[in-house]
């Protein structure tokens, strides 16, 4: 059996002394940190909850404007008879039947992997839009996916719930085809439908894909929502989805323009302001 040399022993004593000094320093730093008063701060989630409450008037005004415009277009201009309305509705109905049918037959909606991939890709797209970097991407699994990024905010977190990625893919492909061929006025048919009919059928199907999976995922305790406050997140998701639907309506209905929709929005905002002011006067300023 060999004995440790003096130099080894002294080195061990020095190391032990340094370790004791570090531990004493840590205890001292911990004690001083406990003694220092912590600054009082309002949690960000509480602030976002308040912001969500202030967004409720916008929710009401935008909802009233959209359904007023849709009702006017459907009744006065018979939009419900147009090909755009019927093929969009047909695509949405076919996908909805498949969604609930797959849940009944297989216990979960299919194709779940396609949704997870689109969900995580949407996160990544919005990270890149905010000039961030994605260092890891996992998005082809029924058990869920994730991305690793150096940038995060509530727009990036909530984007998959209001950004209909596959609908935008359909629009981009249609636009690219229009550069080389007059797709909008084409009368050639593929499986009994013209290119324009296929466009609205696919838009209806992909929009329903986005909507059904979004509604299915929200009650599952997604951290995308809870991190920024569920109430605030749901308010933003509703407003953004309604704006996307309004955009679809403006594009599909020739009688509705961005200008006319904006005027209608302003009109309902004025009505809401007058009603709110009368209620405040009656509650606080009249005896």
Image: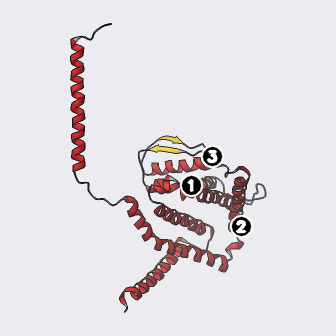
Structural distance between the alpha carbons of marks 2 and 1: 33 Å
Mark 1 Cα shell of 10 Å, populated few (<14), some (14-19), many (≥20): few
Outermost residue on the right side: it is 192
Residue 27 coordinates in the image, percent (x, y)? 24, 39
Q: Please give the residue where the numbered disc 2 appears in the rendered image.
A: 86
Mark 3 Cα shell of 10 Å, populated few (<14), some (14-19), many (≥20): some
Up/down of 240 relative to 118, above or below: below
In this rendering, does residue 235 appear at all? Answer: yes
Q: Quadrant of residue 204?
A: bottom right
Residue 17 coordinates in the image, percent (x, y)? 21, 26
Q: Is residue 15 left or right of residue 147?
A: left
Up/down of 264 relative to 208, above or below: below
Q: Please give the residue where the numbered disc 3 appears in the rendered image.
A: 113
Structural distance between the alpha carbons of marks 1 and 3: 17 Å
Q: Please give the residue where the numbered disc 1 appears in the rendered image.
A: 220
Q: Earlier in the sequence, mark 1 or mark 3?
A: 3
Outermost residue on the front side: it is 1
């Amino acid at each position: 059996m060999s004995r440790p040399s003096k130099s080894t022993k002294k080195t061990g004593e020095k190391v032990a002394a340094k370790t004791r000094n570090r531990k004493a320093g840590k205890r001292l730093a911990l004690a001083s940190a406990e003694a220092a008063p912590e600054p009082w701060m309002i949690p960000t989630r509480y602030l976002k909850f308040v912001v969500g409450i202030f967004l409720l008037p916008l929710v009401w005004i935008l909802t009233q404007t959209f359904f007023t415009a849709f009702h006017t277009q459907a009744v006065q201009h018979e939009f419900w008879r147009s090909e755009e309305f019927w093929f969009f509705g047909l695509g949405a109905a076919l996908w909805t039947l498949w969604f609930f049918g797959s849940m009944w037959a297989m216990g979960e909606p299919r194709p779940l992997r396609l949704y997870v991939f689109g969900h995580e890709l949407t996160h990544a797209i919005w990270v890149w839009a905010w000039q961030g970097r994605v260092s890891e991407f996992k998005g082809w699994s029924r058990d869920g996916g994730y991305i690793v990024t150096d940038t995060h905010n509530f727009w990036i977190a909530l984007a998959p719930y209001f950004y209909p990625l596959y609908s935008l893919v359909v629009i981009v492909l249609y636009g690219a085809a229009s550069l080389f061929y007059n797709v909008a006025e084409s009368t050639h048919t593929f499986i009994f439908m013209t290119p324009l009919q296929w466009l609205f059928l696919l838009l209806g199907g992909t929009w329903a894909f986005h909507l059904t999976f979004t509604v299915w995922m929200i009650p599952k305790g997604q951290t995308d929502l809870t991190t920024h406050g569920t109430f605030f997140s749901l308010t933003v998701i509703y407003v953004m989805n309604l704006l996307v639907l309004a955009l679809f309506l403006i594009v599909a209905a020739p009688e509705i323009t961005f200008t006319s929709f904006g005027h209608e929005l302003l009109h309902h905002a004025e009505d809401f302001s007058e009603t709110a002011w009368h209620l405040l006067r009656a509650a606080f300023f009249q005896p």
